[in-house]
Image (spheres, rainbow, N blue to C red):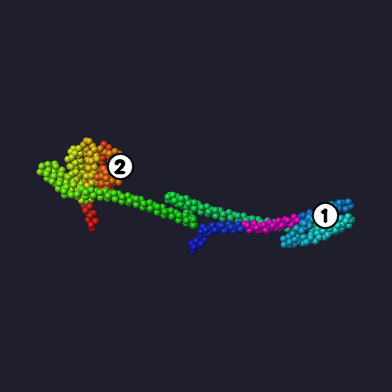
Amino acid sequence: METHTKKGIHLNLFHRIFLFLIVFILFIFLQLAISAYQGKYIMDPIQKSSGNVQKISLLLNSLGQTRDVLSSYRWDFGDIAALVSELRRENQISEDSLGQIDTDIASIGVEQYLLVQAVNTTYNNYRTYLSAMQDQLLKNNIDKASTMYYSNLEPSLNYLYLYVQQLIERAIMDNQSAYDRLIRLNDDLDAVYGLTVLVMILFGFAAFKEVIRILTTVQEMARSSKAITAGDYDRPEISVHRKDEIGDMARAFNEMKKAMRNQVRLLTANNEMEKELHKKNTEALAMQNLLEREKLQLLRSQINPHFLFNTINVIKYTAQEEHAEETDALLSSLARLFRYVLADNEVQVPLSREIQIVDEYYSLYKARFKEKMSLYWDISPSLVLTETLVPSFFLQPLVENSFKHGLGPKESAGSVWLTLEERDGILFVQVRDDGVGMKNEDLEALRSRLLDSPVTGEHIGLYTVAARLKLLDARCSLKVSSEEGYGTTISIEMPLVLKKEEEEDDQDTDS
């Protein structure tokens, strides 16, 4: 029940801003209403009451001026024309002032109303007497005019002056009372007006603060969007401490950025994987092409193998009949070498067979170059040559490479050292010569070409071995180091594979 009540009280962003706007507008109208009320029911009555007192005061002054003029006039030698002119002027002022005095009993009260009626009645008599006296003056009847003034006009003027004096005193008293009441009311309205201004300022500040917070979040989102457009997904997330629509939008934006970042990273990883896979496929195709060329070359070399072997046997028999034992031995080595090369060898062969083929090759080379080239073996006693399996026909190309490119260009005699050893399940093969070596740029070019595995050019045997090692196991490695004038070293590392393990793997595969 409490949760439901909290949800009912909670206002979303739209409702809050709408509430701020409605309250702001309502208080503006309230201020306008207070101002209109003050103008109509406070300021206007005060101005009207002050204006009424001012008109009564003008009437009183005009009557006093008329009384002073008549009381100071010398009837026996006075200027009649000046007197009549002065009386008419003051009478016009009195008429105008009397006509503008408020006669509404609701606004001036009963006492002022009665006094106003008495003033009007007395003023009518006064005006009649004054008109009659002026007529006598204009007819130059000084005595009658004087008698009319003292017997009728002066008493009527004194009564009128007295009534007007009482009227202005009552008007001032009533005006002061009304003024005090209206001023108190105006003060109360000013307090309400100030309160409305304070409320408007508070709501205006709250609305301004809300707008600033909204704009701040929107600006952060805009900057983050530009960063995302530029490919920067590591920009700090938008700080969210709100629980309204802006907070929901900011949180959704952060989640969207995370999803986009993860998606981009996934796509990048997939792209890298595809590139790597494409590279591997390209390398595999190149190696396959190399092997196919080798097979083609082997097929070409197998044309009429019986004719080749028969020919070698004929020469061999001839050498035996002629008792040429060295020639017979060389022909036997050549026959065994051809038979091994042209045979459909398995992928893995015993290391002893590879060593035997290298010996056969070296015997042929030795017969040609005599003491100029020497081969030395360094085989670890822990290696069981008949049980250790290696790729077929991979040692001979390395030795041939050393003889041909290392010792061949050398003028003096040279040697090749072939080392075989096993350490921690790894077979280490090293073919080192003391030949002419290579320049640094030639060595770097060779290392670079070993990565591409070209199918033509120099060192084709070395490239073939490198390609076959890559196909055999990713853990295999072939490294070449050389120094000009000091020789070249080829180092190979490959997992040690024993014949028994190979047979067990085959049995597991069959089962």
Nearer to me, 377 or 267: 267
Q: What residue is shown with label 2?
A: 445
The amino acid type of the residue labelled 2 equals: Ala
Residue at screen point 56% across, 57% down: 21
Few, some or many residues within 10 Å of mark 2 (<14, 14–19, 20+): few
23 or 304: nearer the viewer: 304
In terms of image quadrants, where is residue 174? bottom right
How many numbered circles are shown?
A: 2
* Residue 86 in sight in this render: yes
Residue at point 26% right, 41% down? 489
Horizontal arrangement in the rendering, residue 122 relative to residue 323 (left or right): right
In space, the residues marked 1 and 2 are separated at their CA atoms by: 136 Å
Measured from the top left, where is residue 433 in percent x and y? Answer: 23, 40
Image vertical order of residue 26 relative to residue 400, above or below = below
Left or right of 33, for residue 84: right
Mark earlier in primary sequence (1, 2): 1
The x and y percentages for residue 104 are: 73, 61
Q: Which residue lies under the disc numbered 1?
A: 87
Q: Is 193 inside the magenta-drawn segment?
A: no
Q: Give the range drawn in magenta.
A: 31-55
- Label 1: how many residues lie within 10 Å, few (<14), some (14-19) or many (20+)? many
The amino acid pointed to by label 1 is: Leu
Q: Which of 35 and 319 is in front in this view?
A: 319
Residue 38 forms part of the magenta stretch: yes
